[in-house]
C-alpha cells in the first residue's frame, strides 16, 4: 500500500506544484491521475520515488517511510518501485533482452552489473515477461528497431522484472495511436491485477482512463479536486478539473472516433 500525507513541492522559482496532497493507494488498485498540464501529476509520481525531492510531507510504501530514507536506503527501496516512462528511457543500441534485464541491476553486485552477467533465474524471468508482453520473438532485436508500442512493452517488462510492490506510469500512451494505446493500457491493468500491484498512471486521455482504471484522481493547480469512480466523473467535475469546455460535444466526437476505429479494425482483420 502507498500512503501520501500532506505532500508539498515548491520550486526555487516560487511555483508550488503540490499543495498538501493526501492520497492512499491500496494493493491491487489501478489509479489514474488526470488534470491539465502543470497540475502536478508528473511531480506527484516523481516525488513518490524521490526523482523529485518533496519540500514537505510524508510518503510510505507499506511500512517504509520513503521520505525519511538516506541515499543508500533510497536505492534499495527503488527496487520495489517500478517506473514506466513516457519517453521509454531505453538504451536503444542494446537488445530487447538487455534492456529488460537492466531492471535487475539493483539486485546484482558491481562486477555482475559491469559485465551484464545476470543469474539464470533473472534470464528465465525476462523470457517469461517478454512472452507475456508479446515480444518473445524480439529478444535479440535492437531496441531502436522497434515501434513505439513495442518499446513501451519493453519498458513494461523492464519495470516488472524488478518484482515491484508499486508501479508508477508516466503518460504511457502519449505517443501512441488509439489502438496501440488501448493495448498498452489493457496490458498494464491486466498485469497489475495478476500481480496484485498498486499502480498510479499519469494520463491525459480521460476516456481511455475511464475505460481501464478502477479509480480516478483529478488534480488542478496542485490540489486534488476529484477522487472517485470513473463512472461518477461528470461533465461538471471535468469542468472543475480542466476548466470550461463543452464536454458533452467532446464525448460525442470521441464516441464517433472510437466507432470509426472499431470499424476500421474489423476491416483489417
Image (cartoon, rainbow, N blue to C red):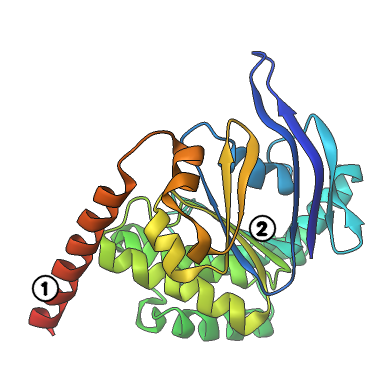
The answer to whether residue 96 of the structure is visible from this angle is no
For the residues labelled 1 and 2, say whether their Cβ atoms are less than 8 Å apart.
no
At horizontal 64% and vertical 47% (from top left) the residue drawn is 45
The number of numbered badges drawn on the structure is: 2
Residue 221 versus residue 261 in the image, above or below? above
Name the quarter where the N terminus is drawn. Answer: bottom right
Left or right of 176 in this view: 262: left
In this picture, is 9 found above or below 30? Answer: above
Residue 34 position (above or below residue 169): above
**Residue 152 placed where, x, y %?**
42, 62
Q: Which mark is residue 114?
A: 2
Asked if residue 13 shows in the view, the reply is yes
- Residue 186: image x %, image y %? 43, 74
Left or right, 204 with reference to 249: right
Q: CA distance from mark 1 to mark 2?
A: 48 Å
Q: Position of residue 112 (x, y in %)?
A: 71, 65
The picture places residue 125, in percent across and down from the top left corner, at 60, 83
The residue sitting at 53% across, 86% down in the picture is: 128
Circle 2: element type? helix
Residue 246 horizontal side relative to residue 10, left or right: left
Q: Residue at x 36, y 72 (%)?
A: 183
Q: Earlier in the sequence, mark 1 or mark 2?
A: 2
- The answer to whether 255 appears left or right of 108 in the picture is left
Residue at the limit of the structure toward the top, as seen here: 13
176 or 2, nearer to the observer: 2
Which one is nearer the viewer's eye here, 258 or 178?
258
Residue at the image position 18 percent from the left and 70 percent from the top: 259
Please state, as top left, top right, bottom left or bottom right, where the C terminus lies in the image: bottom left
Residue 264's mark?
1
Amino acid at each position: 500500500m502507498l500512503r501520501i500525507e500532506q505532500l508539498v513541492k515548491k520550486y526555487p522559482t516560487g511555483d508550488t506544484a503540490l499543495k498538501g496532497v493526501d492520497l492512499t493507494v491500496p494493493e491491487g488498485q489501478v489509479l489514474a491521475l488526470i488534470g491539465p498540464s502543470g497540475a502536478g501529476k508528473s511531480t506527484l509520481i516523481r516525488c513518490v520515488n524521490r526523482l523529485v525531492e518533496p519540500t514537505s510531507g510524508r510518503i510510505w510504501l507499506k511500512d517504509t517511510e520513503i521520505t525519511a530514507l538516506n541515499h543508500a536506503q533510497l536505492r534499495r527501496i527503488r527496487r520495489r518501485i517500478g517506473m514506466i516512462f513516457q519517453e521509454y528511457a531505453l538504451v536503444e543500441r542494446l537488445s530487447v533482452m538487455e534492456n529488460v534485464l537492466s531492471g535487475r541491476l539493483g539486485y546484482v553486485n558491481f562486477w555482475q552489473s559491469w559485465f551484464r552477467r545476470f543469474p539464470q533465474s533473472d534470464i528465465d524471468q525476462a523470457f517469461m515477461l517478454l512472452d507475456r508482453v508479446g515480444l518473445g520473438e524480439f529478444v535479440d532485436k535492437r531496441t531502436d528497431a522497434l515501434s513505439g508500442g513495442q518499446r513501451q512493452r519493453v519498458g513494461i517488462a523492464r519495470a516488472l522484472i524488478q518484482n515491484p510492490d508499486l508501479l508508477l506510469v508516466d503518460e504511457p500512451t502519449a505517443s501512441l495511436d488509439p489502438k496501440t494505446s488501448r493495448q498498452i493500457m489493457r496490458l498494464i491493468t491486466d498485469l497489475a491485477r495478476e500481480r496484485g500491484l498498486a499502480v498510479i498512471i499519469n494520463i491525459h486521455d480521460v476516456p481511455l482512463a475511464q475505460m481501464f482504471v478502477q479509480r480516478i484522481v483529478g488534480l488542478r493547480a496542485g490540489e486534488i479536486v476529484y477522487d472517485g469512480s470513473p463512472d461518477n466523473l461528470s461533465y461538471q467535475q471535468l469542468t472543475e478539473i480542466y476548466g470550461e469546455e463543452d464536454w458533452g460535444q467532446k464525448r460525442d466526437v470521441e464516441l464517433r472516433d472510437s466507432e470509426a476505429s472499431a470499424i476500421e479494425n474489423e476491416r483489417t482483420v
